[in-house]
Image: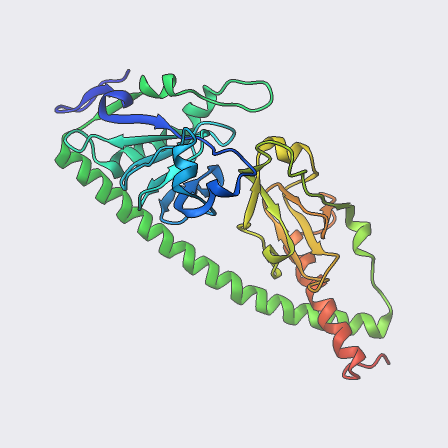
Amino acid sequence: MTDLPPGWAWTTLGDVAELGSGGTPRSGDARFYSGDIPWAVIGDLRDSTIAETRSTITQAGLTNSSAKLVPPGAVLLAMYGSIGKLGMVARQMATNQAIAFAIPTKALIDGKFLFWYLRSQRSLLTSKGKGATQQNISQTLLRTWPVPLPTPTEQQRIVETLEAHLSLLDSATSTLQTTSVRLATLGRAASAQLWEQSATTGMSIAVGSLGRVITGSTPSRTLAEAFGGEVPFVTPSDVGRGGEVVTTARTLSQRGAAATRVLTPGSIVTVCIGATLGKVGWSKSAVATNQQINGIELDALAARPDFVAVLMVDFRSFRRRRRAGRVEPR
């Protein structure tokens, strides 16, 4: 361990917080689910405060399983798959067994300080993962995990300074996003002009010639722990108008992703079935998709995914205008 500033001391996570993990009520028993108790799984952990969860359980589900109620202020940490993903409990809830909870001892450690410290330890925690099919860590490891402990006043100062810098970063990110939207508008204007010129010259290429077209699929519901992991799972409702798919309503575990097809970073996603046929987006990260989505893994030198997505969106608009008689080839 490294030397600490004066007034600090090394301790362990088990010495400054009460640790535990949750459980899962028996699946298929309607008495245990859709109750009024929020029930967190790894997909609910987004390195932020958690007030709502996608799933809920009943009091009977809580009583008849190893799930436990966790109070507000507790820190949640993923032990399976997405090791180290975090959440901070905003209201009383339960968790499944893939999540460890740490209830801070208030006289010793501030909950937010513990949250941000554990966030800094993610890569180290991940490196301790074990398992052939899905990496995981244990509560035994977490109990002995070293924690540098400053005075309560210093903890508060560190949290305030860190969150002030993060607020500035969020503001800068918002500015960049606004700029990106404006650039996209200019790009669409240029794209529309390109399509009108192609109608005149007859020059165009098939999107499929830019890379490999892949249709997605959905893992079987019978596959245990297929959902609620760290792999984004794109469905039609996640796809917008040519923009980046940043978040998805559902995620897959590594096991679930292995049962479907995962697109490489920088791929195009387009809806190929249903009422929103033709919606287009692209993803900077690796994603899985369901069977209503065609993915296009672009060749490295073919084109930028954001540019191709904008062209595809504007081609739909161009065809609608042409069918309406507003664009006529010369």
> To which quarter of the image does residue 315 belong?
bottom right
Q: Is residue 188 visible?
A: yes
Q: Quadrant of the N terminus?
A: top left
Tell me which residue sits at (45%, 43%) in the image: 44
In the image, residue 185 sits, relative to residue 10, either above or below, namely below
What is the x, y in percent for residue 97?
Answer: 45, 29
* In front of the other: 17 or 175: 17
Q: Depth check: give the residue in front, 40 or 148.
A: 40
Q: Indicate the quadrant where residue 200 lies.
A: bottom right
Looking at the picture, tell me which residue is in the foreground, 110 or 157. 110
Q: How is the image coloured?
A: rainbow
Quadrant of image for the C terminus: bottom right
Instruction: Indicate the quadrant where residue 114 lies.
Output: top left
Tell me if residue 66 comes above or below residue 3 in the rendering: below
Count numbered badges in the picture: 0
Give the residue at x 28% y 23%.
13
Horizontally, is 74 left or right of 197 in the view? left
Residue 86 shows in this picture: no
Q: Is residue 240 left or right of residue 154?
A: right
Q: Is residue 264 above or below residue 143?
A: below
x%, y% of residue 3? 22, 18
Q: Position of residue 163 (x, y in %)?
A: 28, 46
Q: Is residue 213 left or right of residue 267?
A: right
Which residue sits at x=47%, y=40%? 32
Q: Position of residue 166 (x, y in %)?
A: 33, 47
